[in-house]
Image (spheres, helix red, strand yellow):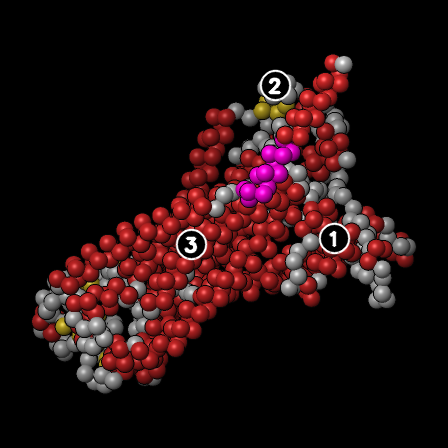
Amino acid sequence: VYEILARTAYGKRKRAEIGIERLLNEGAYSAAFPLHEGPFEISTFEVDPEQLNSRQVIFQYWGRWSKWYKYQPLDHIREYFGEKIAIYFAWLGFYTAWLLPAAAMGTFVFISGIISMGTNTPAEEICSSGGTYHMCPLCDACSTWNISDICSMAKLGYLFDHPGTVFFSVFMSLWAVTFLEYWKRKNATLAHHWDCMDFQEEEERPRPEFAAMAPAMEQNPVTGVKEPYFPEKARLSRMLTGSMVIVIMLCVVMIFLVTVIMYRGIVSMMMYHTESTILRTQAGNIANISSSMVNLALILLMGQVYTALAEQLTKWEMHRTQTQYEDAFTFKVFVFQFVNFYSSPFYVAFFKGRFVGYPGHYGKLFGMRNEDCGPGGCLIELAEQLFIIMVGKQIIGNIHEFVVPKVKAWLQKRQIGAVRGSRISQEPKRWEEDYELIKCEGLFEEYLEMVLQFGFITIFVAAFPLAPLFALLNNWVEIRLDAQKFVCEYRRPVAERAQDIGVWFNILEALSHLSVIVNAFLIAFTSDFLPRLLYQYKFDSNLHGYVNFTLAHAPPSYMDGNHTQCRYKSFRDDSGNYTLFYWELLAVRLGFIIAFEHVVFLILRAIDWIVPDVPESLALKIKRERYLAKQALADNQDAVLR
């Protein structure tokens, strides 16, 4: 029915006045949608399952919160909504199930960190140092402080920076690739089962917006029919202009990042000048947590603004088909959201504390001293940021998904109630009840949310081993929220065929490979794992004296300016030059990155080679089907010849 509606001319074919989609676009109709199979509610008394309609079946056995522990009825979802939506829920369920081992391992690593906190010799030395180590002032107007003041943060930092996190980052890199390999197998099985394995989009019709706005008509070389045409050169120039807008928006994100950094500096300064010892020692922590919340608000705001902008840009670029339009839109939004969400964690992981300088020669930005890592190190600050951004986004996203559809549906009902007027007492027709529901918004936002989450649990997992656990808890809620939206709150979408999750799989693969590189650099340059390892190898296997070894003395030139003798964290000599240990450590770090990447990528390639994309039993079944098809064709030809 949809194909007939989509292909029927309502005006002049020369002007591409064809199809229900264009009529909707021009406002001739307010909506066009397939009807639901009836109400989803089930009467309170016991009903025979055979008497339930399709919508009631999927609500009863899938859409209810009490079914959170059940397998999803994928065949029923596919029959009701089509393959495209069924593939999404199959992927989401598969991903959630695979999060179980990752969450269990992450929780085990975190608990092992808590248990082994007592064996952390450097933290014990900091706590028992008393007034032994006078540290250099944290700001130009501040006074010296004792390193023992940060005892609790030094102990807490060990939870996110111990040898177990190195193992866990390797584990998660292997997990990500194995998950994607086994998804390929699951996907192949489902595509064969639903008979869409060799599905190729037939020659797509032009989008209604494209047909309405295209300046010329030309013959389609495939179908031979004249249809709207937009010159390729003009499209390329528009895409180039659009990419400039993306670059400008990315620059805006960077400006906001600098603003958040300056906010953190101002809050820290205010804390340093208070009389409270607790506020002074926790200044960096308070500034980091509050700035992360400000950053999350800016991220969500910028995401909304840019998505609306990207939609207008993609329409302006005049893509001929819906597939081309969706791919261009997906690319724009993902690139922006990647920078939007990950720029702040990248800054904390790889840039914060790198350009501080040393007493008497501090690096400055806009007159303020460059940020240094907090007392517990940069890794704990990174963990705080990841927790606030990832979990905060999930909570806000779930509230949004729960509340917004209900508000939209209520507004829709009010509008229809005003139109019905006196007929309100009559029993509303099925299509009127479905019109009260909200228009299905597609799967783009759902996929984007999950792919960004996948980035959080793989790219920075060395700093935040509990990320897979929070992702798992979120996804249990997400599946039910999405199920309820599609069954209860959305108008029934037109069923579409699909054989896989499309371009999102390529993005997931890219993120899994990027995670190996980022985790290698994170362990090498941000974690204390390698400095401790080298100290154990060269000086003391129990790390005795490590704290004193990592603290440099302020240069004499600094003390000439009415400053007292103090220490600061760096591998420098009394003149401020890097020591031999610093260069040895740099060589070890670079060697570790090369070794880590090569070993992990080698194992990943081995997994890719060992695990076939199509299960052997399915490959045999496909060969058997092809053989039988050839036999049937041959028998048919023999019968004709006789």
Question: Cα distance, mark 2 to mark 3?
Answer: 50 Å
Which of pointers 2 and 1 lies earlier in the amino acid sequence?
A: 2
Q: Which mark is residue 329?
A: none
The residue carrying mark 2 is 219
Q: Residue at x 65, y 34 (%)?
A: 625
> In the image, which residues are magenta?
614-626
The residue carrying mark 1 is 437
The residue carrying mark 3 is 174
Q: Nearer the viewer, residue 232 or 268?
A: 232
Q: Residue at x 53, y 39 (%)?
A: 327
In the drawing, does residue 225 fall left or right of residue 166?
right
Q: Nearer the viewer, residue 62 or 242?
A: 62
The majority secondary structure of the magenta stretch comes to helix
Amino acid on which the number 2 mark rests in the picture = Gln
User: Does the image show residue 209?
Assistant: no
Give the residue at the far right of this rendering.
426
Above or below, comparing residue 414 to residue 551 in the picture: above
Q: Residue at x 69, y 44 (%)?
A: 82
Residue 43, percent from left and from top? 84, 63
Above or below, comparing residue 60 to residue 535 in the picture: above
Tag 2, which secondary structure?
strand
Q: Are marks 2 and 1 in contact (CB under 8 Å)?
A: no
**Count of picture labels:** 3
Residue 521 lies in the magenta stretch: no
Question: Cα distance, mark 3 to mark 1?
Answer: 43 Å
Q: Nearer the viewer, residue 234 or 149?
A: 149
Tag 1, which secondary structure?
loop
